[in-house]
Image (tube, grey):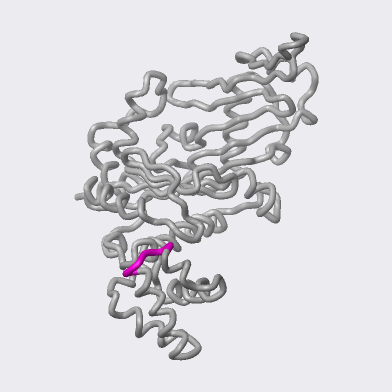
Amino acid sequence: MLIDWLTMRLPAEHIGREQWERLKQLGDRIARYSAETGEVIYESQAWDSIRSDSHQISIRLGSDAFWIQGSPARICGDGCAVFGSSVSSDLNLHGCADVMKRFVSFQLNEIFPDTKKWIVSRVDVTNNIRMNSLTDVRQALTTLRNCEGGRYRVSQQAGDTVYWSQKSRLRKGKAYAKGPHLIYQSKQKNYTGRTYTTNEIELANKLLRLELTLGRQFFNERLEKPWFELNETELKKYWNDYFERMIGDTEMNKEDSIKDKLINIAKSEGQAKAAYGCWLMIRSQGWETAKQSYSKTTWYRHLKLLRQVGLGDADLSVGKVVEFRRKIIEFQSCDSWEELKQASA
């Protein structure tokens, strides 16, 4: 796993007047004028890229803060954004913020205050799932496109990419084929990232990338401690809670065991049969029709039991135990090129 993106800002109160004026001269400015008076209503700086060899981070001076955003993986080690390295692959959020701040400080010849004075508003936690081929990756994406219901809403599909709740400021998800994504990036006119070999591209074709974005609302409203106290275990848990509920129990691979499992965990046989009847209705009539057939309390009681026996939201969305689960049993997360090479040998 790795931290693949970080957005952070330093409030104006921590920036001296002279430094503010210097930062103001770094990039193009965007201004809004009053049509009646010609006065400037507000003025802000456009995002500008700081490049150094294969490394790249974007900066912007807003009306009340200095912003930095980009991939910390791109400025660690050799700039590999597939598996990352150092603080990025260690899921060390404070370390990633510090690396990005020091990179910008060096490139601009500016001194910035302690990293803990900065405010984090977005973090992407990413994991690579190793599969046998690009075909398997695309089959998995086809299944995941149908994963709706509960907290998942497929908001956009583009090529080898699936998005969930794309406009959410709390949490949003993304799944895509990493190999084609590397090819797409490398063909961009302004690409300055690491150059991947043909062999690495072929290996990356076997990677399904699952990415969780924790957004501004998460850090403002849901996080009950300072962002710099978030540790590796907690970030992994956020990722697992989002995607494991989607996929479900990887040992759940036979539909004929669902009824027996429900009987074993439900408080009564009647409750088990009712939950199983809900599952059969989802299978025959679909998620939305089934949902309308129950009161809110009963619906969520049935879903809770169905999830407890191992069904994921991907299963519940389509009314069957999905093929993706049977495949993922054979595969696992992959954290390095060497691991990927050995598995592909």
Q: Which SS type dominates the magenta stretch? A: helix
Magenta residues, start to end: 283-288
Q: Residue at x 31, y 67 (%)?
A: 320
Residue 330 in view here = no
Q: Position of residue 8 (x, y in %)?
A: 63, 36
Q: Magenta stretch: residue 229 in it?
A: no
Residue 288 occupies which quadrant of the picture? bottom left
Give the total of numbered labels: 0
- Left or right: 167, with 25 as reference point: left
Q: Position of residue 238 (x, y in %)?
A: 53, 56
- Left or right: 104, with 181 as reference point: right
Q: Residue at x 68, y 25 (%)?
A: 62
The correct choice, above or below, for 148 with respect to 10 in the image is below
Pick the residue in front: 281 or 143: 281
Q: Residue at x 51, y 39 (%)?
A: 5
Kindly give the residue lying farthest to the top in the view shown. Answer: 38
Q: Magenta stretch: residue 284 in it?
A: yes
Pick the residue in front: 99 or 193: 193
Pick the residue in front: 31 or 112: 31
Q: Position of residue 74 (x, y in %)?
A: 46, 33
Q: Position of residue 231 (x, y in %)?
A: 59, 53
Residue 41 occupies which quadrant of the picture? top right
Kindly give the residue lying farthest to the bottom in the view shown. Answer: 269
The correct choice, above or below, for 341 with respect to 182 in the image is below
The correct choice, above or below, for 18 with respect to 279 in the image is above
Q: Residue at x 65, y 48 (%)?
A: 219
